[in-house]
Image (tube, grey):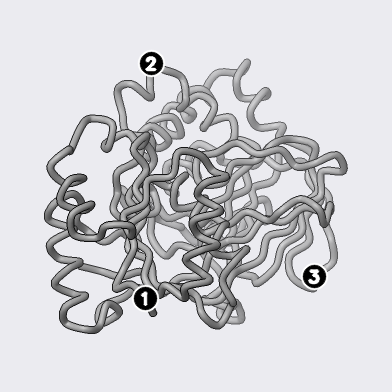
Amino acid sequence: MTARFVIIHNPRSRRNRSGNEHYSMMARQSLGENFLSPASQAELLHQVEELARRDVGCIVVDGGDGTLSDVLSAIHRYYRPDRLPALALLPSGNTNLIAGDVGFGLRGVEALVRLNQLALGGDMRRNIRRRRGLVVSWSDPQRPSVVGMFHGTAAFRRAIELAHQPAILDRYSHEMAVVVTLGSSVAHLLSRRFRREWTQGDRLLITVGDAPARQENCFLFLATTLQSLPYGVWPFWHGADSDDDGIRYLDVAGMPPRLTAAVTSLLRGRVPQWLRNESAYDSGCAMRIRLEMKEDFVLDGEVLDSGPDGVTYLSVTPPIDFIQA
């Protein structure tokens, strides 16, 4: 391998825009051509293709969830599945939901110093958290797959659209904005006008693994390959026969009973027995999910369309090592 590690730095990320010239100067001096700052997604793809050709085994992502998703998508395209690089995620973006689970824990000069220490020690992977990437592909084989770690649609898409409003986004970090917006949604649900608009849901045809497809009005659908979320939120649960290494999902049917109580519990990371027993709330873990819907969906904070026929597939990458400080 030709480099101890490479940094992919997104200068447009929220925290990087605030200015950290000393760190950038030190990183360029330390890494030279291995400090990359792509000006576009096309340039990022070209750079990752070159890293794969060089068999670079460690990539440091200095950005937010969107930057990590772009890097994961490029890795998925160009790296061999049995030669995936280790990643270190420096939380510098507008959205840092993923960093709460697999982030490096440091950023800026502190992160650079620690990364150099790990590299000099000869084992960048001495302390890792292993997760899979969440692959989204379309029925159109010509459309490249994208890789992220947190997917959502229906009410989650609406919440993201609200969270992107300047009144909220300018005040809160994105991951906090999503939590604030979901919390405020509970108040909306107390209003008859908003209750029907939100809870009737979107039409969704879902196939989980080899189970029969089911068509429903869906109030909320979430899927992730993470194992924790910020602020103690964890709305997933599953049975003993589930594969813990797959995609954790939550599927809430339209017009679900006791919705305010359910949302309040899930935002606190609690799943009471009545919620587990209620058929309108389904959670599990699978290696592959097929979705068919007309509406857009959200992957790591970015809104994406479902394609002309509305068919998308969720699957997983091989395990990826996320380096810890």
Instruction: Tell me the mark number nearer the camera, choosing from 2 and 3.
Output: 2
Looking at the picture, does residue 292 appear above or below residue 289? above
Q: Amino acid at mark 2?
A: Ala
> Residue 7's x, y, as percent?
32, 57
Looking at the picture, does residue 281 appear above or below residue 182? below
Sooner in the amino-acid sequence: mark 2 or mark 1: 1
Q: CA distance from mark 2 to mark 3?
A: 43 Å
Q: Dividing the image into 4 quarters, which one contains the N terminus?
A: bottom left
The structure residue drawn at horizontal position 13% and vertical position 52%, both measured from the top left corner, is: 109
Element under disc 3: loop
Instruction: Tell me the mark number nearer the camera, choosing from 1 and 3.
Output: 1
The structure residue drawn at horizontal position 39% and vertical position 40%, both measured from the top left corner, is: 95
The structure residue drawn at horizontal position 57% and vertical position 50%, both measured from the top left corner, is: 151
> Residue 42's x, y, as percent?
57, 45
Residue at which label 1 appears: 2
Res. 211 mark:
3
Residue at which label 2 appears: 167
Q: Dividing the image into 4 quarters, which one contains the C terminus?
A: bottom left
Element under disc 2: helix
Q: Quadrant of residue 134?
A: bottom right
Q: Amino acid at mark 3?
A: Ala
Element under disc 1: loop
Q: Are marks 1 and 3 in contact (CB under 8 Å)?
A: no
Which one is in front, 169 or 7?
7
Q: Amino acid at mark 1?
A: Thr
Sooner in the amino-acid sequence: mark 2 or mark 3: 2
Sooner in the amino-acid sequence: mark 1 or mark 3: 1
